[in-house]
Amino acid sequence: MKIAVTYENGRIFQHFGHTEQFKIYTAENGRIVSSEVTDTNGSGHGALAGMLSALGVDVLICGGIGGGAKTALANAGIRLYGGVTGFCDEAVNALLAGRLFYNPEVRCDHHDHEHGNKDHTCGDHDCGTHHCGNHDCK
């Protein structure tokens, strides 16, 4: 099984569509046998699902994710475990052990609101009304 995790400095990056890297794990018999960090090369949102599919990924662990990306992942046959925080390695080990805490209804709504910041990107700011990764990602 191949598991992708949105990645930034060892932690789960909190916005799927803006992730610059994934950590890709290969697991066999419930154990990690290899892992590597791969760049997205500027791909974003819907294109990321195609990239993960081309890499043979079966499962994605991430923080927040929008509805379009969720649909693209489902269409690619990639199982989603969203709403996850913390360290990538710990999350993958928890998934393999059947104890990963995730939110099956995760949804990042930041595309649907305005708060005066045109450069808004989840995971990078605190604009005073919320902090992405914990605000409206339900």
Image (cartoon, rainbow, N blue to C red):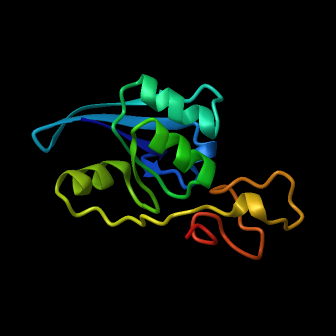
Q: Quadrant of the C terminus?
A: bottom right
Give the residue drawn at x 79%, y 66%: 113
Q: Is residue 5 left or right of residue 126?
A: left
Closer to the camera in the image, 56 or 39: 56
Height in image: 57 above or below 16? Answer: above
Residue 26 percent across, percent down from the top left: 25, 32
Q: Is residue 39 visible in this depiction of the protein?
A: no
Q: Is residue 51 left or right of residue 27?
A: right
- Residue 95: quadrant of the picture: bottom left
Height in image: 5 above or below 55? Answer: below
- Residue 29: quadrant of the picture: top left
Q: Quadrant of the N terminus?
A: top left
Q: Residue furthest front?
A: 75
Q: Is residue 54 visible in this depiction of the protein?
A: yes
Closer to the camera in the image, 118 or 124: 118
Residue 133 percent across, percent down from the top left: 58, 64
- Residue 117: quadrant of the picture: bottom right
Q: Residue furthest right?
A: 116
Residue 38 percent across, percent down from the top left: 46, 28
Give the residue drawn at x 50%, y 57%: 63
Q: Is residue 69 left or right of residue 57?
A: right
Q: Residue furthest left?
A: 29
Residue 13 percent across, percent down from the top left: 52, 51
Give the residue drawn at x 44%, y 29%: 53
Q: Residue furthest bottom?
A: 129
Give the residue drawn at x 62%, y 48%: 68
The mark total stands at 0
